[in-house]
Image (tube, grey):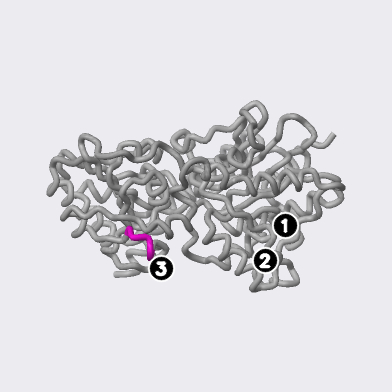
Amino acid sequence: MPASAKKSRRVAVLADSDTRWKWGALTANRIAPENADESDIRLDGYLLRGRATPTARQLQEVGAPADSLREVTAVEFLRTMAREPYDVLVLALVGGGVQAMLHGLKRIWEGQPERPVVVTGYVGVVYEKLADGLLLRHGADLVLANSRQDAERFRAVYEGVGADASAVTEVALPFLGGAPYTGGHDPYTVVFAAQPSVPDNRRDRTYLLNRLIQHARKHPEREVLLKLRSKPGEHTTHIEELPYQKLVQRLDPPANFRLVYGHMGEVLDRTDLLVTISSTAALESLHRRIPTVVLTDLGVREVLGNHHFVGSGCLASWDQLDDGHRPVPDEEWVARQGVAAGGGSYEAAFDAARERIAKLLDRPGGLPALTPYYTPATAPGYLPGILARHHLGPDGSPLPGAPAHDREPGPVRQIVRRAARGAYRHGVQRVAPVIRRMGEL
């Protein structure tokens, strides 16, 4: 009996970082059948082994539990998918990882009468590498767009290269929610939502930190919080080479300035003004009608991602904030981003995805083979390198010597893996930045 005929729907999520796990797990819950309760869904989580594999603390902070959760290599995951009868598979990965899995899955499911519905998408605002990222995701049954604006852009890219655009499905960010903002807290709280890779240099990050501290000194009646994504030594979706925790050690912030971690939604519960460069936290804040500022101090530039907020009404500088400016978002812009939805319209944003998945699961004769846009014929100079990073050959099969191709890893191999990953992370976060700085001398 196919898995889809059972009462309980089985869903797998493969993620490669803390934020992508959050997006993938919450998306899996949002696209579950309407009126389904927790007993109707079994969610198995798989964490792709790499530099950004989340720690236990990060997973707890994300607050997206699963019925099971384990770390895997790409080949281990494919081997599991060959034998487990899942209904839906959510690929919450960087574009190259999605492409590799699509080719690997296509190969292992050849000749099988049933396969899961494959879903992928983006964890937040898409402000760079639009064509590259989209074409690497092409081939999934559903490519989720988090807003009407993204859905239009996604379809335009696919149609522009002659690729099938029918997989593009408009939804919304799965982690929006929380109580709407009703007024000032005591004390009035300003939160700066930091990003691991934006800005990417010491000068700009030090500037932002100094302005935040200056704001705290100028407004001693306010609580000023620096919301951080990770602790030193942890990796997120993006590499953070200059943690604010280290930069602040050289300064002398006032008593009303603090560093905070934790779930973004809980921090927003006490926020009166959210400030950021271009974090997705801005969309969470706007959804709850919290006054939100996207900083212009470092310019409005594609490399910062704040160009995405042109027309939002949220662009402002620290000088304006110090003088008491409160932004007023543009309602039309906000609506196009799929946020600030009133009543039940936010939940309805996932109806199209639910309906599409239900139709695919009930498709007579099962689902057709996955058909990514990139193939050895269409991208012979690009695709093999992407697949090789995940120990896959041009046809999606494991390369000779691929880790855990023929057996589960033994205790010794597991120890060696952990040591190697620790050394790799140390090199990325500690050694590489030093070498780069020495090269700039």
Magenta segment range?
Answer: 310-314
Q: Are marks 1 and 2 in contact (CB under 8 Å)?
A: yes
Q: Residues within 10 Å of mark 2 (few under 14, many from 20)?
A: many
Q: Earlier in the sequence, mark 1 or mark 3?
A: 1
Sequence-first disc among 1 and 2: 1
Residue 302: assigned label: 3
Q: Secondary structure at mark 1?
A: helix
Residue found 33% across the figure and 64% down from its top = 437
Q: Does 207 sit left or right of 78 as displayed? A: left
Mark 1 = which residue? 103
User: What is the secondary structure assignment of the residue under circle 2?
Assistant: helix
In the visual, does 113 lie left or right of 253?
A: right
Alpha carbons under labels 2 and 3: distance apart: 27 Å
How many marks the image carries: the answer is 3
Extreme residue toward the top, this view: 39
For the residues labelled 1 and 3, the Cα–Cα distance comes to: 32 Å
Q: Does 71 sit left or right of 431 as displayed?
A: right
Point out residue 306 in the picture as x, y percentages from the top left corner: 37, 62
Front position in the image: 205 or 175? 175
Do the CB atoms of the residues marked 2 and 3 lie less than 8 Å apart?
no
Given residues 218 and 36, the one toward you in this image is 36
Residues marked 1 and 3 touching at CB (< 8 Å): no
In the image as oriented, which residue stretches furthest toward the front? 343
Which percent across, then down, holds residue 179? 39, 36
Which residue is identified by label 2? 383
Report if residue 419 is visible in the image.
Answer: no
Give the quadrant of residue 160.
bottom right
Asked if the stretch drawn in magenta spans residue 312, the answer is: yes
